[in-house]
Image (cartoon, rainbow, N blue to C red):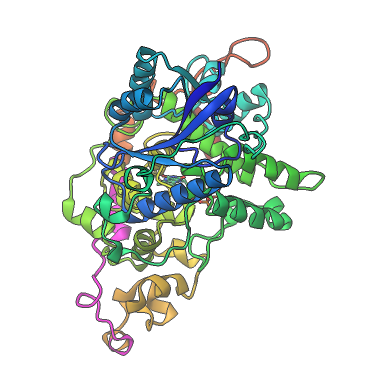
């Protein structure tokens, strides 16, 4: 029987390495590529304007690529559970395909849609292609638990073997006997959304540095892969949080939306590495992609992963509720220029370097303001182009020393850290032009500048730019003690690494994160 298919795009906004899309085209006479737009769904209500713009760009690009194959993208408005039964009937659908998602919200949504498909006699095919590996397979290999250390993840994926090769994009030849019937009112019903329809004010947009879409993603990937020496020498800790143009790939928004396949990225790197000396995980670019797998695995294997309460891996901390501090951090008014410059870049451009994320996350939580990582997670979710449920939750837990990382006594200085890579404070001057006339000596600590220097710079601290909201030296020491208290109350099980099943000589209990920490401390 020739099928009438819906391929449901959610993430995976691409044609390359899209095995579920290829499955849709098997024995198919009609295909409807669909994106369901539901701005009111709980996962979308917090999305900021830059990410909406990125999504619209990605959808336009996808539609453009589909047109070249004589098809179109149908942007259907509403809730998936409500729109699909209507579409199944209207288009006489016999098959539904989609890329597998792992987040709790998506799993719940998909369960409902699969049930509805079954009720309508619609066959469902889904494929894993958002991650390098089938995340559930990694967990299975680890006796049903998420690995809590990177090295454990590495052991597990080594035992599984290299990620699968990406599959090619469909061609006109693949589509030659397949139609996409397009109604006359296509534009009115299924056309591209506009920001205004998403309750966003386009007047608030700033320059678009990272336009959404698969073509843009592949172009950027090509450009990076041409820099073979850079790729082979890439070591994440050596990249700079405050360079004036990004020191890492900025492929993350493209990965989040699936405009770029992780496997395509992985194998392109493998090609570049071939026959050359190159850096290794965790610091290499392959390593970065494995970090992504690490947090995806944690997101699947650890209950309530985006919360502190009910999350068995997470240290329970008595964070303060302090709306004033939170607002100052969110709105770049902490009085620490390095922190405020990063938060300004985040709001304006939607992307900040990984170590810049470290600096502001540590500052908000255990370093200075003692505010829950869940609050920071929400702000990042709104402002980041690459906002990703698993990666955001996992990295916030890491930085707040709640899960995975336990050296809470290592606190980033909001003053000294930025100076290491930008003595002159050029990054601060770019994002906080108000401070641009301060001499380098005071740019990280303008409150220390004599009045005459502040006057000459045209910026009086306390009037034109805020005084620091905390005394870092004092508060960070106090917070270390508070953290020590939280650690003392931890259940002995919360830090235990999951047991391994694949070590030589049968099962063994892997060392706990704390054991590893103790070993590390001895060698420091
Ligand atoms: P590159 O260094 O070029 O790395 C290539 C790819 O590897 C990235 O695109 C990304 O997909 C992956 N990757 C790199 N670092 C990490 C990491 N630490 N964890 C997981 N995957 C990684 N990343 C997100 O994509 N979405 C988020 O919501 C997110 N929230 C974060 C929150 C905090 C508090 C912190 C500290 C980090 C967060 N990260 C998040 C991880 C990381 O900062 C970004 O993935 C990275 O900076 C993206 O820039 P890039 O593409 O240039 O990275």
Q: Position of residue 223 (x, y in %)?
A: 65, 57
Quadrant location of the N terminus in the rendered image: top right
**Range drawn in magenta:** 455-482
Quadrant location of the C terminus in the rendered image: top right
Identify whether 486 is placed above or below 502.
below
Is 217 covered by the magenta stretch? no
Q: Is there any visible trace of residue 491 in the rendered image?
A: no
Identity of the residue furthest to the front in this view: 184
Identify whether 256 is placed above or below 423.
above
Q: In which quarter of the image is residue 42?
A: top left
Is 463 covered by the magenta stretch? yes
Q: Which one is nearer the viewer's eye here, 2 or 143?
A: 2
Asked if residue 252 lies left or right of residue 157, the reply is left
Q: In which quarter of the image is residue 53?
A: bottom left
For the point 38% across and 58% down, the residue is 346
Q: Where is residue 475 in the image (x, y as percent from the top left)?
A: 28, 54
């Amino acid at each position: 029987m020739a099928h009438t298919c819906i391929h449901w795009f959610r993430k995976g906004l691409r044609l390359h390495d899209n095995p579920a899309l290829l499955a849709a085209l098997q024995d198919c006479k009609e295909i409807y590529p669909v994106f369901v737009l539901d701005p009111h769904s709980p996962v979308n209500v917090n999305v900021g304007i830059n990410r909406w713009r990125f999504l619209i760009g990605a959808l336009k690009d996808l539609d453009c690529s589909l047109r070249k194959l004589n098809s179109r993208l149908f942007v259907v408005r509403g809730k998936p559970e409500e729109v699909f039964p209507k579409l199944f009937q209207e288009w006489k659908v016999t098959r539904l395909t989609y890329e597998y998602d792992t987040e709790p919200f998506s799993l719940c949504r998909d369960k409902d849609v699969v049930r509805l498909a079954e009720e309508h006699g619609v066959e469902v095919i889904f494929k894993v292609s958002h991650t390098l590996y089938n995340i559930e397979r990694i967990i299975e290999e680890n006796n049903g638990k998420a690995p809590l250390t990177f090295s454990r993840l590495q052991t597990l994926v080594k035992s599984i073997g290299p990620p699968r090769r990406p599959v090619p994009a469909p061609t006109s030849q693949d589509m030659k006997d397949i139609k996409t019937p397009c109604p006359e009112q296509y534009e009115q019903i299924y056309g591209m959304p506009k920001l205004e329809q998403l309750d966003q004010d386009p007047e608030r947009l700033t320059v678009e540095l990272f336009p959404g879409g698969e073509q843009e993603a592949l172009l950027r990937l090509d450009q990076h892969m041409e820099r073979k020496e850079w790729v082979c020498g890439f070591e994440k800790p050596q990249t700079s949080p405050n360079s004036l143009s990004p020191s890492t790939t900025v492929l993350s928004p493209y990965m989040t939306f699936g405009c770029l396949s992780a496997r395509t990225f992985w194998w392109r790197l493998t090609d570049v590495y071939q026959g050359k000396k190159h850096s290794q995980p965790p610091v290499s670019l392959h390593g970065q992609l494995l970090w992504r797998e690490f947090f995806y695995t944690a997101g699947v294997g650890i209950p309530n992963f985006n919360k502190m309460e009910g999350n068995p891996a997470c240290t329970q901390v008595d964070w303060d509720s302090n709306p004033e501090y939170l607002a100052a951090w969110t709105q770049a008014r902490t009085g620490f220029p390095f922190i405020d410059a990063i938060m300004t870049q985040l709001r304006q451009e939607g992307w900040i370097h990984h170590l810049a994320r470290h600096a502001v996350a540590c500052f908000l939580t255990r370093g200075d303001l003692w505010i829950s990582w869940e609050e920071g997670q929400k702000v990042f979710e709104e402002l980041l182009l690459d906002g990703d449920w698993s990666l955001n939750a996992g990295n916030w837990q890491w930085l707040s020393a709640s899960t995975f990382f336990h050296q809470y006594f290592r606190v980033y200085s909001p003053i000294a850290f930025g100076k290491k890579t930008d003595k002159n404070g050029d990054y601060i001057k770019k994002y906080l032009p108000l401070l641009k006339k301060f001499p380098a000596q005071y740019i990280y600590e303008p409150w220390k500048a004599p009045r005459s220097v502040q006057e000459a710079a045209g910026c009086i601290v306390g009037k034109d730019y805020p005084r620091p909201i905390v005394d870092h030296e004092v508060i960070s020491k106090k917070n270390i003690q508070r953290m020590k208290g939280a650690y003392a109350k931890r259940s002995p099980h919360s830090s235990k690494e999951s047991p391994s099943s694949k070590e030589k000589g049968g099962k063994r209990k892997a060392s706990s994160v704390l054991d590893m920490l103790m070993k590390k401390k001895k060698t420091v």
